[in-house]
Image (cartoon, grey):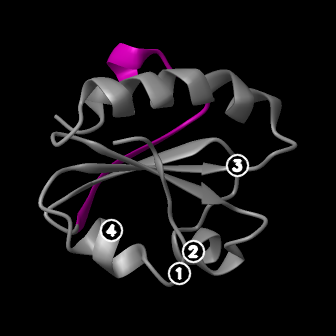
Amino acid sequence: MAEITITKDNFEAEVLKSDIPVILDFWATWCGPCRMIAPTLAQIAEENVGKIKIGKVNVDEEMELAVQFGITAIPTLIAFRNGQKHNQAMGVMSKEQILDLIK
């Protein structure tokens, strides 16, 4: 499974009701660091099909979700387990650092 675009319309089904951990990437097309971290997130999504879900939230298109989670800088990653916010981090991170968010 590739990355999933998360919107306010599918947030509950894809994140809150997910039976596997979810990492949400709050990003924007104009954000250089967001573009730097994107290939790593895509790799994690491809290598962890059925184990980890990677959701992409475009902050320009989904302002409501960005406000709901208090996003003030991007990229921001938020990890969810069992429908609950589990961890959060900002900035460019290594693959290992990203995977550590859901441990």
Range covered by the magenta-colored residues: 84-97
Gap in angstroms between the C-alphas marked 2 and 1: 6 Å
The residue pinned by badge 4 equals 14
Residue 80 location, x and y as percent?
27, 56
The residue pinned by badge 3 equals 73
What element does badge 2 sit on?
helix
Mark positioned earlier in the residue sequence (2 or 3): 2
Residue 51 location, x and y as percent?
16, 39
Residue for point 47% across, 30% down: 41
What element does badge 4 sit on?
helix
Callout 4: few (<14), some (14-19), or many (20+) C-alpha neighbours within 10 Å?
many
What element does badge 1 sit on?
loop
Gap in angstroms between the C-alphas marked 4 and 2: 14 Å
What element does badge 3 sit on?
loop
- Is label 2 in contact with label 1 (beta carbons under 8 Å)? yes
Residue for point 34% across, 80% down: 12
The residue pinned by badge 1 equals 8
Which quadrant would the C terminus be assigned to in this image?
A: top left
Callout 1: few (<14), some (14-19), or many (20+) C-alpha neighbours within 10 Å?
few
The residue pinned by badge 2 equals 65
Callout 3: few (<14), some (14-19), or many (20+) C-alpha neighbours within 10 Å?
few
Q: Is residue 4 located in the magenta-colored stretch of the structure?
A: no
Between circles 2 and 3, the one closer to the viewer is: 2
In screen coordinates, is 55 left or right of 28? left
Q: Is residue 92 above or below residue 9?
A: above
Residue for point 57% across, 74% down: 65
